[in-house]
Image: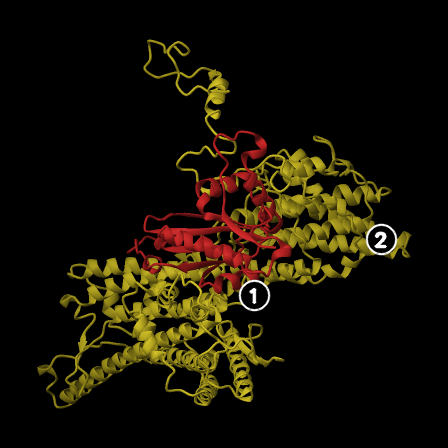
Amino acid sequence: MAESATESSECDPAPQTTSVQLRPVAPNYVDVTDIFTQETEKLYPGELAMIDTFQLVNAINALEIMDAKMDTGLLDMKSNDFEFSTTALRTPNEILYIMDELFAMEMAWNTGATLSQTVYTCLYVEEILMHNFDGSLPSAQFGAPNSKIPPIEKNNRESFFLHHVLRVYVVATIKACDIPRRRLQCRGILEDEDIVTEAYGLDLMQFIPADRVITAIEEVLVSLSEFLADAQTSEPENTNLINCIKGFQNRLELRIATIKYLSAADAEPEQQRQFLTTTGQLIDKLPEMHGMSSPLLSAFSVAIQGRLECAMPPRPKVQLSFDDAIKIFKQIVDGSTDILRIHDYNHLGDILSYFEDFAMRRPPELPYVRCQLMKQFLVNGKILGKLNMRNVLIEDIKDLCSPVLSIFNVPINHPVRFPVEEFFGQAEVCYETMFSVMCHNRSRLRQSLCSLILEWDSLQVSAENLESSPEMAEFSPILHPPGSNQELPALPLSSWVYYRKLKLMIWIVFLGFELDIYKLEEWSLMLWYASYLSDRMAAHLSRVESIVDTMVNIQNREHQAYAKAKKNRQAKSIKAPQEYVKLEAVKRTKTYISNLKAENDVYRELCQGYLCLVAVLSLSGIIQPVQQIREMAGEQLFTSSELLYKLRLKPFSTIGVPELPSYQQYLQLSDLQDWTIDLLLDSAQTSISNTRNLLNALGKPDHLVNAKLTAASTIELRKSLLRSCIGTSIAIMQLRKLGLKPSDRLIKNHRAKLSVDREKYHPFFPVLTVSEREL
Amino acid sequence: MSIIYRQYEPPERQDTAQNVEERDLTEIRKLIAQDLSEPYGIYVYRYFIYQWPNLCFLALEEENVIGVIVCKLDPHRGVKLRGYIAMLAVATRHRGKGIARKLVSLAISNMAEYKADEVVLETEVDNEAAIKLYEGMGFLRSKRMHRYYMNASDAFRLILPISQESTLRYCVLANSGSEQTNDEQIYG
């Protein structure tokens, strides 16, 4: 039966008095069985009748009833969950187990699993959420719907443990999912990819205030203390009971602390810090009594998926050990505490440095922490709730270029006022997106950066158009370096955009190494391209530095000339010199550029070392391009080396500057004809040694510009770079020992065995380890 | 025992008996279901195989299906023709005989004949055998996808460029708004 598509006038006579068509109370149905049968006879068995818009996703989402892999209903039919009683009394050790397993499930949900595979698998959670909870806290209980919670009786400990201790624990866990679940629906955190907030139509006690849950736990804690005192007095030898009660206390106290910090996520940093510290201290107590728990496996069941409004195929219950759950919780608490440091910035540039450092963390921060950072950063459209994006952006430009300050304050009637405003508007969008993508997971980060560089490239075009306008001369002057006929346009906006874009491009290339996106034969190409970008970065930073120096020189000369004229009492006859830049700001810029150049030099030199090493592997035939192998084997080639080159560098193919070198240029530049293996190994070793020297020469992290919040992690990253140098030096030594010879033929039984080691090394520079294999 | 390769054979239109209806499809499904972690319903098989029967190849030993590849080929974002390898399976006892390689070759050759600009697929990052197979045929890992599979593991998207179209980045965005964009929205 189907609802009639058209409403005939006989069925639904419209009243003459109104033009509005009135619907009948019950829908009209027509029997389409015959039509349906007729139509299906035109199909052959199994033929898929579909509309044009039917896509693969529709086919995937079409569940097949009675197929065990697809039909969650079968899970329910085959389960024995109905035999489990949520009102049956349990030993304190079993209660402890349920609490800890539920905690593990909550943490598993925090790492991205669905609620139906984690928290909902607890039958006590199901009892409350699916059967009993009617919006009021007392209804959240384990008995039949509308039952009263049994009163606390001193002589009925098991009842108290179940109906009060476990009950509030379960309620608190539900609340501890509810608060972040609503919060996690934020920009930067991707539904399904990072976290699944789907609640399957169940109310996770959204309208029960957190305070009420805390009060309920506190009341139980008071009774629990009495039970403990009683047990210690009347049966001091029953250490099992006493320890279990202490375990309950720790767990309930931790629940209070958790709910407090979760509900204070928008409070003042100091208050958040306080709650998080308390939580952190309580976590350490948790493992003490975990050993006392006694498994009650039947209290958790994946068959809940068959009872939920759930359109996905069955998924297994997530298995997460208690120790791993503790680690995840600590990571959340430590991460949430750490991000509060962004409020402690000295200079606005510290905040961006913090984000960059945050995105580099290993292991990566969990979705809740990433979401929290974004929420702390951007409050009501303002940075930290008080600053405009423009402020931070301007400081960034000042730090890099020390431009003529009036560029940030163009008079309202000036012809470039509007274009400058337009540029800053566009820049703000690019800048804000840059912050938000740094809160993405690492895989998504690379993809997002590939998109973002297009926006920055477009911004660069805007900056160049703007700064080529003659009316911009007073803000972006054409400088004439003393003693030179050269003209040097300052171009502060274009310079800043280009720097930021180059930095993102370099990051994309290196993230490919980290995410294992390049196969070994591509390493030489990507290291070469990374070197190419680093060379551009070095040249660009030198140019910016020389502009700043020139501006200072010109300013100094003008000041000196003015002072001299003044001394000779001719001051009135000459114009007072223009103050292009503030010397204090220039000092900061010079230090900043010097830091950036030094850091870029490290990466550039290390790339060079790696490039030589990989060249040895190519020259000796240890790494051979697939295309070459297929060609030699006489196999059909479906693609070409040129297409592979273009595909690999596709994210950069439309970038205006720096232009992507052509494949022919790459071939010319990567030709190894004039090299010998020994020469390449020497060159690799020299670059690695140079990198170590450059690393040692880097400034102390706390003396760097915009590094107040990142000093400690900078030290760690430098150490990991040093380890990459050491690891690569060892690989060079190993290759020397093998006495490799050039080979342009495939050697199947080569003595060298290669592997990529990522652990302990800098994520951008995994180490190639070489060992000799038995032939 | 010799292995023969052939295209999927759709049921004859006049065959209406249930046992004839989807003989290849039933075998294919049985073989694939043993290997894949993702549960696919009959509609997924029908979606691919009925629309692109010429891109489904079987490896048979004495009429038993011991290997299969299921693919599709359609326009991608209106700028290129993209082949997609949806499923590939070889019976456990027949692995290591080059059957998968042969099936992939047949599928790619056919897609190339139909002027495919590229061929893509996804595979688990830990599936070394699959990665080795496809990379050995020229595929590149174009991106990594976080928690792509139901078992929470990451995936690599692998691409084999066949024509220039595959390597072109189509920019539809300039001075875009603040909405976060996926690279798929920007270039095909």
Instruction: Please indicate whether residue B3 sits to the left or right of residue A38 in the image.
Output: right
Instruction: Please indicate whether residue A531 sits to the left or right of residue A31 in the image.
Output: left
Q: The disc labelled 1 sits on which kind of residue?
A: Pro
Q: The disc labelled 2 sits on which kind of residue?
A: Leu
* Disc nearer the start of the sequence (2/1): 2
Tag 2 subunit: A
Q: Which chain is yellow?
A: A
Residue A174 at x, y = what percent? 63, 45
Q: Which residue is mark 2?
A: A241
The crowding category of the residue bearing disc 2, from other C-alpha atoms within 10 Å (few below 14, some 14 to 19, many at least 20), is many
Residue A675 at x, y = what percent? 40, 87
Q: Which chain is red?
A: B
Q: Nearer the viewer, mark 2 or mark 1?
A: 1
Q: Nearer the viewer, residue B82 or A100?
A: B82
Q: Which residue is mark 1?
A: A363
A200 in relation to B4, above or below? above
**Secondary structure beneath disc 1?**
loop
Q: Nearer the viewer, residue A748 or B63?
A: B63
